Amino acid sequence: MSSEPRAFAAVDRGTATVATSLVGRVAGHWRLLGATAGPLSVGPDPLIERLRRRLAEADPELARELALDAPHAATGVPRIESSTVAPPELAVLAATDRHLVPLAAAAAGAGWRVHRVVVDGAEIVPVVAALANPRITAVLAGIGDPPAADERPLVAELTTVLAV
């Protein structure tokens, strides 16, 4: 008997769920035997056991061949695990909502967690406090090109906030 594993589990821990897959060596090729997901609080072990049980019920001979026929046999198989990290946080700063909305949408579409900050009509202390948030990784600032009439008076304020 070979010391090479005949099956392994793949685990992906996301921000809210955990997904598991059971992969086995079948007829000389690695094949997906099953996949499932559940809340992150459940953990991967019960999900991998669920997949093992389903395999044993659906194809007892294959489960025996892969040494996955006994209860909890899958807990000893090798695992490949990945974890989702929290997305980086970005402060999107704009003179007006008109320019904030498309900038924030583009940043969110690129995978950033967006904090929206509008200079127009805002008190300076909350604006600076939002930018000083230690979770903020970067700042994206925007204004019209050329600045519209309602933005022109805000250019100096926006520049000053960014310089702080």
Image (spheres, rainbow, N blue to C red):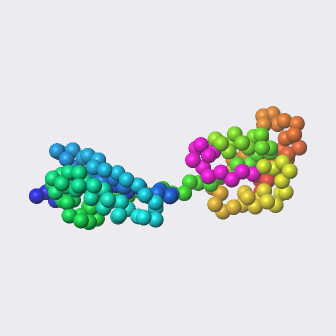
The total number of labels drawn is: 0
Q: Is 130 positioned to the left or the right of 59 in the image?
A: right
- Residue 100 lies within the magenta run: no
List the single residue furthest toward the top. Answer: 146
Front one among 38 and 103: 38
Q: Is 118 positioned to the left or the right of 42 in the image?
A: right
Span colored in magenta: 107-117
Q: Residue at x 82, y 61 (%)?
A: 125
Q: Quadrant of residue 105?
A: top right
Q: Position of residue 159 (x, y in %)?
A: 80, 48
The answer to whether residue 58 is above or below residue 106 is below
Classify the position of the C terminus by image quarter: bottom right
Residue 66 makes an appearance in the image? no
Q: Position of residue 139 (x, y in %)?
A: 68, 51
Q: Position of residue 3 (x, y in %)?
A: 16, 59
Front one among 14 and 3: 14
Classify the position of the N terminus by image quarter: bottom left
Q: Quadrant of residue 48?
A: bottom left
Q: Residue at x 72, y 42 (%)?
A: 101
Q: Position of residue 20 (x, y in %)?
A: 37, 55
Q: Residue at x 69, y 61 (%)?
A: 133
Residue 26 makes an appearance in the image? yes
- Residue 108 lies within the magenta run: yes
The answer to whether residue 106 is above or below residue 126 is above
